[in-house]
Amino acid sequence: MDQAHIRNFSIIAHIDHGKSTLADRILEVTGAVTGREMRAQVLDSMDLERERGITIKAQAVRVHWRGHELNLIDTPGHVDFTYEVSRSLQACEGALLVVDAAQGVEAQTVANAYLAIENDLELVPVVNKIDLPQANPDGAAEEIAELIGDTPDHALRVSAKTGQGVEEILDAVIQRIPPPKGVSDGPARALVFDSSYDQYRGVVAFVRVVDGSFRAGEPVLAMAQGTRFEAEEVGFFSPTMQPADALSAGEVGYLVTGLKDVARLRVGETLTSQANPASEPLPGYREVKPMVFAGLFPTDSDDYPELRDALERLKLNDGSLSYEPETSQALGFGFRSGFLGLLHMEIVRERLEREFDLDLLVTAPTVAYRVETPTGEQVEVHNPADMPAERERVEEPYVRASIIVPKDGVGQVMELATERRGRFDHMEYLSPERVLLLYELPLGEIVFDFYDQLKSRTRGYASFDYDYAGFREGDLVRLDVLVGGEPVDALSLVLHREAAYSRGRLLVDRLREEIPRQMFDVPVQAAIGSRVIARETIKAKRKDVLAKCYGGDISRKRKLLERQKAGKKRMKQVGAVEVPQEAFLAVLNLDEGTKR
Amino acid sequence: MSGARHLYVHLPFCAARCGYCDFVTVVGRHARHGEYVDALIAELKLECGVLAERLETVFLGGGTPTFTEAGALQRLLRALPSCEELTVEANPETVTPDLASLLAEEGVTRVSLGAQTFQPHLLETLERRASPEVVRRAFYHLRDASFDNISLDLIYGIPGQSTSDLERDIDEALTLAPEHLSWYELEAKPGTRFTHVHGEELVRQAEEMEEYFERVVDGMTRAGYRWYETANFCLAPARHGARDLRSRHNLGYWLGRDYLGLGIGAVSTVGAERWRNTPRLGAYLEALTGGQRPLRDVEDLSAAVKREERVMLGLRLDEGLPLADATDAIDPRALDRLVAADLVRVRPANGAPPALVLTSRGRRLGGGVTAELLV
């Protein structure tokens, strides 16, 4: 189609502000799906996404409206997937900025709106849920205007639920969002903004064609990674896969690649034709690196092969998941896994437990540290147990955090951010009632309970999002936990020197409560290097004996003994000390136990 | 096979049921005592094939054997095969001079007296009928009837029992100078009336009571008693001529010997089989009146289970367990660990084969040590 009649757009919204409902309504109004086919929230295909109200994988749907071809590109809703979001946005010329009329602007809206502005997108403000009794459309419109420097009357007032105002949105997409401006007859270039893995057809790439066109059967080159394949099929979603002869400049659709590994075709890649390659790739490609790491261990060590297979299968669909084998003295065999962020970690963990029926022990999340050794060597550390004892300097990742809070919660947020080594950057009133605070914070402080603390200190009113802001030097130490004199590798932590004392005390106290008394005294210590900073002793049991045992008692006593023996088998061995799984869980979930 | 040399006879009758008791008991029913004794004698006849020609020990346990109507009790004692040690359990309130002489005349060599405690408020908690004075008097009646092997049963860990209550019990028991003492920790079984009433108090006192076992062992050993089994103490031979005052009958259990049990709920172990008679009086009487064996629960004991039990029981003894009996059942690496932790010793006896022996701390932690030691 002629580029002048194409519009490519996405929807930016905070969780639960109605993005998926609006997308469904657009499909319905444009006739892309009939009422009978209408399944609530067509675009979110995974169960997990439905349940959590989060969209993990982007997809693109083509609809027609008043002589135009509109491509709606769905973006992941969370910051962990910032890079994927930015690529989805790069595939568009504009975006609907949807805000709940009752809730107003939230932190996630802010982060993604900034991302859209950075990508030069035309923003169409939309106030949704105007049918709600507690809706305040004017207030929400003013908050949006304040955020993006617009006028409040520019915002459309709609109810995705009832359908009110949805046609006006489609009209505004055509009127306000510019058409694509690619070179139709130049060498072909397409941006890969997402991909998924199909068991039979291999990797399916979701692309936005910028210049030229792609035909089925054509040999294709991925310019950054050098991956070559033949486009077995090209087409678009409407909302199911519709094969087409070609995808041309300005259009959005898919390429079936036949590749067996999503990692060979990363998000952000530029595809071109092998026969007539473009000289320059599209800007902005980078390899996303995991920022948050944790050890995943099967609760039952016999499940290790199942965990390995499950991770392999997840990785087929999730190119940003990484893992390598890890052996812990205390927890046995498992995998040190890298995630884009905390939510990504939670999603992977839930999928492993739900789709693969695995019972997991997950160590405390940690971040990637850059360490310079005294010999000048640079190493990246993903596991506190690997932190070298001798080091010249350590750098840790920082984030730019946006926090939106009712004005009477500002003090609480500032206190928390300061406790977590936050650097205040900026504060503004989005409305007379709500304040946006920008902080720079070490990511390592956020992966400990930050979000829980924020929620509890503001009675649930704060919203929070972040974006990575590079590495900075920090006064960081490795805190080891020793049980019976043996370090428990799975419990080591890297943290700021000043936080080490209270954290060490907390860990030691909790372990003392959780580890049952043994046949000998068990010291529990927290140490930085060879210096013990907290210590408790689990006193030895004084008595553990079956009181009397005569002819009639023997079978019952034997069975008690066998139960005791079986209980010991379930314990994890740290040196001579038997530590129940629950003790590790309690310590690894320390944050949950300290919620206020 | 030479046959079982140990016989247990269960006499279930009691005047009242004590709240903490979990034995098979029958309250009252005087009219049936004679009938029950007849059934016991009939069962003995049916089972005498598993017994050895000469018995080492017979043990009359309960219930309250001495509550059994005197004529019936006498008939039973006369019907029993002769043996080297004949023990009868007695409750203090049933021990009269007449009963004591009846037991002595009928060849009873040893009496085990259920004293439980000498503190009136604790006797009340246990729902025992005897007062401390009655306990002492019973002991003297037995001595007067010339019993020279009397055992006292005592309980510690009673709800409301303070450390000084326990110390007083130890002193008062020692004042009587019994040849043998058994000290049992009170077991409050979940779901029982007793636990319902006293459970909270026991939880509150748990920390304090943890050292009661240690206090008992210290008190006994300081007074010259031999801690020969986890819960059992006897006067040491050095102070009492050459007599070995250990309970020979119970040693039979701890050494893994075969035994025959008669009566309701009684357990027998012969070779690779263990069975337990029905605990129901009516069913038991009916079967034996008709010349039939009573209904039984049978358990097959594999060689592995036998070995496991051998270790479990043998380690309760101060003499320990011959290493040869343990080697197939224990984890050698666990043994090394436990030896290093000073919980177990491998003791070469003079000339005798080496034995696994628990240290005194190891004996207090015997459950955990055994669980760790077994493969």
Image: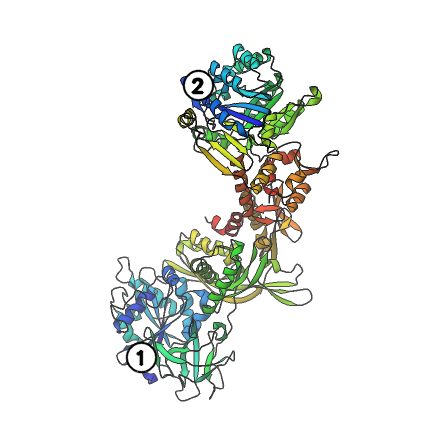
Q: Nearer the viewer, residue A503 or B220?
A: B220
Q: Chain of mark 2?
A: B
Residue at 24%, 68% in the rendered image: A35
Label 1: state its secondary structure.
strand
Q: Which residue is mark 2?
A: B33
The answer to whether residue A152 is left or right of residue B156 is: left
Q: Nearer the viewer, residue A540 or A568?
A: A568
Q: Residue A426, position in %: x, y?
A: 46, 63
In the picture, which quadrant includes the N terminus of chain A?
bottom left
Q: Are dots 1 and 2 on a single chain?
A: no
Residue at 60%, 42% in the rendered image: B374
Amino acid type of the residue tagged 1 in the rendering: Glu
Amino acid type of the residue tagged 2 in the rendering: His
Q: Chain of mark 1?
A: A
Quadrant of residue B287 in the image? top left
Label 2: state its secondary structure.
helix
The answer to whether residue A238 is left or right of residue A399 is: left
Disc 1 crowd, CA 10 A, few/some/many (<14, 14-19, 20+): many
A537 versus A59 height, above or below: above
Q: Residue B273, position in %: x, y?
A: 52, 36
Q: Which residue is mark 1?
A: A69
Check contact, mark 1 vs mark 2: CB within 8 A.
Answer: no
B25 versus A398 height, above or below: above
Quadrant of residue B373 in the image? top right
User: In the image, which disc is placed on residue A422?
Assistant: none
